[in-house]
Image (cartoon, grey):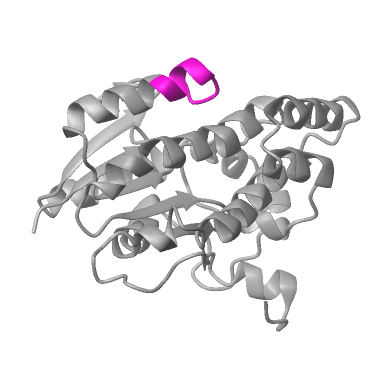
């Protein structure tokens, strides 16, 4: 049965691969990105977030069967927190009423294996408190002291924790809507290609995200997981951070269980 999806970050990387897979299976996909998609919206701004919800409501006729939030940045800049966290949360929360009107509704957001890296807890706690201004200040402080590299992992740790908290609430689990995150390892996308093309940067990436199973992945290898998590067949997986990282999490954290 054909379903209606909304995918953010749909113009490139994991979002594009997921959009293409779903469309190839006969589903309707409403794509959103800065440009090159059905909806042009800047998720770093409140105006762009509102525009996403407004246009998605118009284009979908007021109902969605699944939302896949792929839009993200890896800049050493507070903009990363604004998009990766508050943009993603606004997408999921803003479109939840449309999911509630859909059939077998499902939602997934893209986190990262970087969520297990050491994080700036000032950033994480500000995000979880819903204080965007404080999160931006904390991220800027990290950048100012030369620790901008921690911003991305901190944003993704906050996403993972937000999903764990939010998925079990009345608005999500209580309404029959599974909400999950995936945690990819190093994926070869336009965002990561400049790092991977430079031997020194690639060595740093591989040291921080060791992937013993098949190495770096392509977006097309991640899309099937997003696909399954948003199918009606997924009846009980919720509040999970599903690692698709070639074993990086197991290398980094060992055999400790949650």
Residue 111 place in picture, x, y as percent: 55, 51
Q: Which residue is depicted at the point 23% across and 60% down?
A: 104
Q: Nearer the viewer, residue 245 or 126?
A: 126
> Is 129 displayed left or right of 92 in the figure?
right
Q: Is residue 194 visible?
A: no
Please, which residue is most extreme toward the right here?
145
Query: Quick check: is 45 in the magenta stretch?
Result: yes
Q: Looking at the image, is 99 positioned above or below residue 226?
A: above
Residue 30 place in picture, x, y as percent: 23, 35
Residue 177 place in picture, x, y as percent: 36, 58
Task: Please state the extent of the stretch shown in magenta in the rendering.
Answer: 42-50
Q: Looking at the image, is 66 positioned above or below residue 76?
A: below
Q: State the quadrant of the N terminus.
A: bottom left
Q: Is residue 159 visible?
A: yes
Q: Nearer the viewer, residue 95 or 88?
A: 95
Q: State the quadrant of the C terminus.
A: bottom right
Please, which residue is most extreme toward the top here?
47
Q: Which residue is depicted at the point 70% across and 52% down?
A: 203
Q: Which residue is depicted at the point 34% across and 62% down?
A: 176
Q: Which residue is depicted at the point 16% across and 32% down?
A: 61
Q: Looking at the image, is 107 positioned above or below residue 80?
A: below
Q: Quadrant of residue 238?
A: bottom left
> Is 64 displayed left or right of 193 in the figure?
left
Query: Quick check: is 239 in the magenta stretch?
Result: no
Residue 199 place in picture, x, y as percent: 66, 45
């Amino acid at each position: 049965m054909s379903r209606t999806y909304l995918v953010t970050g749909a113009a490139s990387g994991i979002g594009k691969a997921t959009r293409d897979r779903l469309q190839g299976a006969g589903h309707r996909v409403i794509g959103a990105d800065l440009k090159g998609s059905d909806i042009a919206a800047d998720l770093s701004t409140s105006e762009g977030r509102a525009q996403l919800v407004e246009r998605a409501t118009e284009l979908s006729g007021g109902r969605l069967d699944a939302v896949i939030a792929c839009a993200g940045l890896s800049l050493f800049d507070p903009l990363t927190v604004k998009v990766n966290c508050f943009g993603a949360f606004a997408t999921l929360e803003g479109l939840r009423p449309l999911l509630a009107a859909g059939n077998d509704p499902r939602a997934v957001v893209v986190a990262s294996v970087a969520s297990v890296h050491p994080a700036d807890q000032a950033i994480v706690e500000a995000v979880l408190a819903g204080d965007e201004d404080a999160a931006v200040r904390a991220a800027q402080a990290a950048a100012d002291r030369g620790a901008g590299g921690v911003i991305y992992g901190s944003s993704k740790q906050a996403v993972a924790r937000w999903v764990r908290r939010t998925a079990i609430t009345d608005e999500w689990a209580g309404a029959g809507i599974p909400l999950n995150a995936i945690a990819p390892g190093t994926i070869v996308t336009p965002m990561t290609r400049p790092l991977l093309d430079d031997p020194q940067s690639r060595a740093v990436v591989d040291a921080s995200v060791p992937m013993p199973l098949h190495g770096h992945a392509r977006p097309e290898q991640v899309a099937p997981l997003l696909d399954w998590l948003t199918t009606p067949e997924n009846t009980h997986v919720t509040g999970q951070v599903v690692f698709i990282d070639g074993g990086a999490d197991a290398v980094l954290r060992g055999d400790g269980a949650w």
